[in-house]
Amino acid sequence: MIDQPTIDRILDAANIVDVVSEFVTLRKRGINYVGLCPFHSDKSPSFYVSPAKNICKCFACGEGGTAVHFIMKHEQLSYYDALRYLAKKYNIEIKERELSDEEKFVQSERESLFIVKKYNIEIQERELSEREKQVRSDRESMLIVNNWAQKYFTTQLYEHQEGKAAGLRYFAERGFREDTIRKFQLGYSLDQRDALYKAAIKSGYKKVFLEKTGLVIAYDNGGVNDRFRGRVIFPVHSLSGKVVAFGGRVLKKDEKTAKYVNSPESEIYHKSNELYGIYFAKQAIVKADRCFLVEGYTDVISMHQAGVENVVASSGTALTQGQIRLIHRFTSNITVLYDGDAAGIKAALRGIDLLLEDGMNVKVVLLPDGEDPDSFARKHNASQFAEFIRQNETDFIRFKTRLLLDDAGTDPIKRSALISDIIRTVAIIPDNIARSLYIRECSTMMEIDEMLLLNEVNKIRLNKEERQANTPPSPIPATPVNIPEYPDIPGYQPYPEETLAEQPQESPLPPDNTIPPPPPEEYSPDDGGGSMPPPAPFTPPANIPVGPKRSPYEAYEVALLRYIVRYGERILFQYTDEETNEDVVIRVSEYIRSELERDDLTFYTPLFKSMMDEAADRCRSERFIANRYFLAHPDPNVSRLAANLISEKYQLSKYHTKYRELEQEEDKLDQLVIRELYAFKDAYVLSQIKEIQAQIKSMQNNEDMDQVFELMKKLTRLNEIKNILSKELGERIILKM
């Protein structure tokens, strides 16, 4: 136990600004400092640090306290472990002795009173459950095992003959100096089945923690293999410098062996919340007020060795919100380095949109052909690298626009998709001035009227704000309806009938991404409404649980999404344009999206809309096959839903049984897709008729006959459209009046 005089020295030495600055970018504001809170998703600085009082406080989530409490919370340490952390930071020698039970009780009471009185902090304590105690204990044990493993790998690299011959030789070929190798704690795992496992057991470490950290793989027959055998090792450090995972690169050329193997997810390692190199880069990022983002381990190491230290890697994965928040703690400026691989660039665009949404200033640098950050850094020093960046970096919006414009060429459908994509990207930028400048520049580059772009961007932002404002804090259960339920879908909110009915409709068509009014309860054909009944949505499979009512058009969305998932890349129409004499090819997914967009309709379920957009954006790629793409999707919600849509045996309504022949649906895609689109439009038209009828009744009661006449005109037009939909479902129908 740490004695009290040592504790006092640690508390006196611990400067709150100095401690917090290691993890949070702080800026002076009056006599205090302020930054983004590390304990919640903070987009506007709410975390205040007081040098005078030597405490910190978040006025959003309430977290705060002394330097000790900050380290306890941030690093998930006990009180005394936090003291040891600070003692190491300030080079304070710790003298420990075992306290008696009476001394322990007195010290505990003294510490509690001291904190409450001096800092006026409300302390809410509870006894940890056995499960919580076990989790904490396991976490500490796993960190200890990883720390030992890192030292073991380094020892094998420098002292074992195999490590010298294979590991050191590889690092030398990459141009890594010894100081760089030791800085990043690189190592080597022997090419033996269980060398690490035997060494760990001999040193007293338990098999269970070797498994949990992923250092070894245990089999049902009792056998154990080292996960990283025969590989050079790249330790992954947390923000505080703890080794939470490893990456291993194979040295043998074997097509059956993965080039890189990484530690699995664990209680101490969540890949979406970690960035390779952040521990070594954080101070340089703050100093330069910029972060370079690359893809791999060697990119980071080579750039560090070249003198460019403000660099991190996403380790080959798309950026996540957790990684973005980690970068945003230290800077709002990020530069993404790409090699010349166009396919890889396009795959990374979606992740960068998240950076813009988080309010970050994103630049892009395209390296020369045949170069990646690793090779480029080895050929240039820090000043040369900085000069190249200065001359070649471009704003992300401009970069994305030029890239997609070149890809779209003169194809009108591709250019339409491009414009929609760019508009969505611009719309998520939170800064009004920056957004206006981008709209003006995009207008020039895409040869589109600036006011049109501005209106579309404003529409997207307004709809988003309205959805956020109208979203109930807790879902209100409604009477179960015949709509398929897909649990755990992000952004999937129930919409109670009462709330939907109250939404005003100022125009006959809903703006993009808003929830339309509920469809009418019954359908009464009038004005010669035709012999064919209105299209009915399919009945979901019986094995899918039914939950609360959501978007009233969900059933129609699922029916269309099924065709997108199954046949999204298939050619639906192919013809020769009479004016340009060009061959026009329209595929299933892009046709569905364009047909909805031309009538200001969309999928109102966020996950469904995202899947439609992904398919429509990728359907012209030669490698894109919709069902394979969605089944292998990294989002488990998408892959699970795709599996349902591909494999389900649908129970059809009488309408579907009469008018469809599913065994031949591939041959009738043009008819079936159009029919589902008209079913969607028909439901919407009927809801509009009901809404206008209600408005007419209200205006008549108020004797506002001018408004009544205007509404009657709209009602007449809607009835005409309804009759056409009922009579001629094979004809192309446009809803706009």
Image: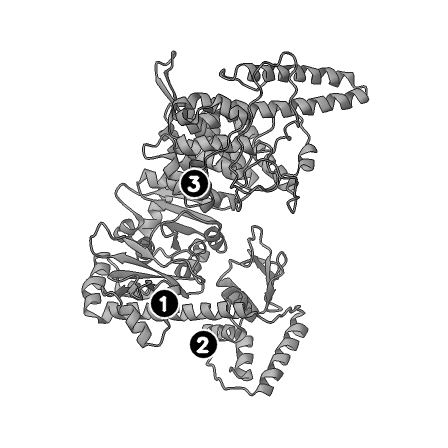
Residue 468 position in % (x across, y down): 62, 41
Left of 430 or right of it: where is 190?
left
- The amino acid type, in three-letter code, at marker 3 is Ala
Give left or right: position of 517 versus 633: right
Residue 198, which numbered label? none
Question: Is residue 598 something that shows in the picture?
Answer: no
Q: Secondary structure at mark 2?
A: loop
**Residue 91, numbered circle:** 2
Distance CA(mark 2)–CA(mark 3): 57 Å
Q: Nearer the viewer, residue 558 or 84?
A: 558
The residue to which callout 3 is attached is 643
Which amino acid type corresponds to the residue marked 2 in the rendered image? Asn
Give the Cα separation between the discs numbered 1 and 2: 32 Å
Q: Residue at the location (46% across, 72% down)?
A: 89
Asked if one can make out residue 715 in the rendered structure from this viewpoint, the answer is: yes
Q: Nearer the N terminus, badge 1 or badge 3?
A: 1
Q: Is residue 167 left or right of residue 134?
A: left
Whole-percent x and y of residue 464? 59, 38
Quarter of the image where one finds residue 684: top right
Check contact, mark 1 vs mark 3: CB within 8 A: no
Q: Quadrant of residue 711?
A: top right
In this rendering, which labeled residue sits more in front, label 2 or label 3? Answer: 3
User: Of the residues under marks 1 and 2, which one precedes in the sequence?
Assistant: 2
Q: What number is the disc on residue 210? A: 1
As drawn, 34 above or below 147: above
